[in-house]
Image (cartoon, rainbow, N blue to C red):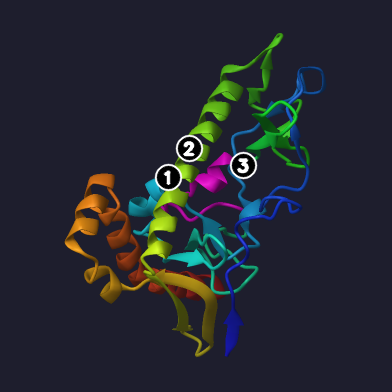
Amino acid sequence: MTKSTPPQVQASAAALPMFYSAPRPLDRVRDGKMKLDRPTDFSFAGKTNAIPLLVDEFPLAAAYYPIVFADGPLPVPAAVVGLKNDSNLFVGKDGAWVSGAYLPAYVRRYPFILMDDPDNKQFVLCIDEKTELLKESGEFSLFDGEQPSAFTKSAMDFCAALRQQGDATDEFVKALTEHELLIPNNAEIDARDGTRFQLSGFLIIDPKKFDALPDSVILQWRKKGWLGLVYAQLLSSHRWQNLVDLMAVQQK
């Protein structure tokens, strides 16, 4: 039996965010002539089996991935994309994401990221300096003269929206933990070649505890739009078979 555990998807203060090797602030002088290609090679996401999710993504992600919560002080929602720690079954050998499958926002954001600037008490748009997407002959300019290009402004808006959704995600997860709805779950998956994978170290929503919530809480959650998130997570438990099918195809 092969044991697998979801990776840590919420970096500590001293750790780099997943996928990022050398994030640094964009600089007009340094990056004035640099351009960025449209990402078509997702090899940078090929060595993980879980991708962080935001609550707005639950409905779409649940159609393709099992949704779990990586255990920690504040559990992190994540889409399971592989049965082994260092293997993303949705990234092919050519770096392409499986056609038609939902692409998580955490992946779409790369190589940009908002990072804290504690000195100025603000967020700064950064880019992973070591990404292969960044080059002088790329498709999209980062700057238009002295000002950020429309492409860079769009990336800033996208990253800002994700940060806001991150706050909403934290609020939802805190409510789940306060009502003790998250329980440990060990998934045993049988591959077609007879290999059994055991995934541990993650949490799921307990449907019995959810059904036992007081009506007042259910009403509050309905107004917040949280009931659909709970149902999406519960329904996503049927997506483990997607991983088994992908593994079988890649092993041929």
Residue type of the residue flagged with mark 3: Tyr
Q: Is residue 193 above or below residue 149?
A: below
Residue position for label 2 = 164
Q: Secondary structure at mark 3?
A: loop
- Depth check, mark 3 against mark 1: the one in front is 1
241 with respect to 46 (left or right): left
Horizontal placement of 127 versus 230: left or right? right
- Residue 96 lies in magenta, yes or no? yes
Secondary-structure class at tag 1: helix
Q: Residue at x 49, y 76 (%)?
A: 248
| Residue 17 x %, y % | 67, 50
Q: Nearer the viewer, residue 106 or 63?
A: 106
**Residue at 39 percent of width and 69 percent of height:** 180
Q: Where residue 107 sits in the image (x, y, percent)?
A: 56, 47
Are discs 1 and 2 less than 8 Å apart at CB? yes
- Compared with 1, 167 (above or below) is above
Boundaries of the magenta span? 95-110
| Residue 209 falls left or right of residue 82 | left
> Between disc 2 and disc 3, whose residue precedes?
3
What numbered label is drawn on residue 60?
none
Amino acid identity at mark 1: Ala
Residue under label 3, please give it. 110
Q: Which residue is mark 1?
A: 168
**Residue, x 36% and y 59% (percent of image)?**
62
User: Where does residue 61 sit, x and y in percent of width and height?
Assistant: 39, 55
For label 3, the crowd category at 10 Å Cα-Cα, with few meaning under 14, some 14 to 19 and many 20 or more, is many
Can residue 52 be found in the magenta stretch?
no
* Disc 1 crowd, CA 10 A, few/some/many (<14, 14-19, 20+): some
The answer to whether one can see residue 252 in this image is no
